[in-house]
Image (spheres, rainbow, N blue to C red):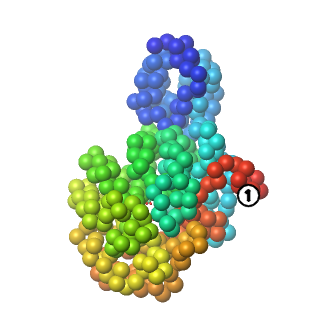
Amino acid sequence: MSRAHLSNIAKPVLLKGMSLEQLRTWCQEAGEPAYRGTQLFDWLYKRGATDPAIMANLPSGFRGWLAENTLLSAGSVVGKSASALEPTLKYLIHLEDGSLVETVSMLEAGRHTVCLSSQVGCNVGCTFCATASMGLVRNLHPGEIIDQLLLVQEDRGIPATNVVFMGMGEPLLNYASVIAAAEIMHHPRGLNIGAQRITISTVGIVPRIKQYTDEQQPYRLAISLNATDDQTRAEIMPLDRKWNLEKLLNAARNHARTSKRAITFEYVLLAGINDSIKDAGRLARLVSNIKCKINLIPYNEAGAIFRKPLQHVIEAFAAQLKEARIPVTIRWSNGVDIAAGCGQLAAPMNLQEDAQVSTDY
Ligand code: SAH
Ligand code: SF4
């Protein structure tokens, strides 16, 4: 296929998000040798290039053609808020079609963790989560997922050490794009982030967890449990009616056994709903034969209905799990003053809706 043929494509081609193989094939179709694809892969991901002009090892004719016919970036930063409590930044990222997503960057204990969104909004409907109020606008493309990371790294001037898919959206409902993005982040020629430093958090899409296990995906898996009986869980997570605790825990157990890696169970603590000592005991029993750790997340403000439990209640819950010898950590969310904590992300549907954008940046 000639390059001229490719230029007939009306829309510029988005290069960001293409794998090494895809870029090599694409270069050949554009009339260039395959190794140009490898060079492009380096430029796009390792060096975060956003302009072909700087790609010094590519012929100038090809660079000019790339500038005319391709898009290197999928989004741009249009808003940034800084927490007064920790070195946490929340970014508002504008995508080509006008959609907006939020991405959070946290510096802690020598780590730079970036919390990525996988969808614009979410249609799973968990009642404690602000993202749910947006409904689902659309899935993100792999390039739009990677660009969140690259834009944050560029702005902060600090490479990410850890990535968590815990922003807006349900990653396993955008499975192919999330895995494609994780592969590029993990690739030694890409961002070279260790697989165990990439965590995918799911609400519990059982068939996709099975697929993830069967495919031997090397990334860390976190599962949002959030309740210890189906009645309570279904009230706060409607999805439990489809995939209940038994089905979910079976899939989790199978994943831990097959991968020989511990699962992280996330448990949002909601005062008076799932935070009793009885709940802690039940939780310990539910996970007793699964290699795991439990991450307790005290509820972050996201609407009027729920409350965060008192400190002593949170500590008693954790102590009960420790007594049962279950590894447990409490995740005190970062950036709650700028609504950057777990479950607080809900980007405006368009720029005009968010009066803060121009002043915050
Ligand atoms: N959709 C995925 C990942 C995004 S949510 C999932 O549900 O797992 C990331 C984590 O934030 C989940 O564990 C979720 O249960 C938790 N969360 C959602 N709303 C929250 C809130 N208001 N306070 C604390 N944690 C919350
Ligand atoms: Fe979606 Fe996760 Fe929020 Fe549930 S907690 S609505 S799955 S983003």
- Of 116 and 113, nearer the camera is 116
Percent coordinates x, y for residue 215 in the rendering: 28, 45
**Residue 186 relative to residue 283: left or right:** right
Who's the residue at 54% across and 31% down the image? 14
How many numbered callouts? 1
Who's the residue at 52% across and 31% down the image? 15
- Of 356 and 136, nearer the camera is 136
- Of 95 and 112, nearer the camera is 95
Amino acid type at circle 1 is: Gln
Percent coordinates x, y for residue 21 in the rendering: 40, 30
Q: Is residue 340 above or below residue 7?
A: below
Quadrant position of residue 361: bottom right
Q: Is residue 118 above or below residue 229?
A: above
- Of 359 and 272, nearer the camera is 272
Who's the residue at 54% across and 47% down the image? 137
**Residue 138 relative to residue 96: left or right:** left
Percent coordinates x, y for residue 39 in the rendering: 49, 29
- Residue designated by label 1: 356
Percent coordinates x, y for residue 111 in the rendering: 51, 61
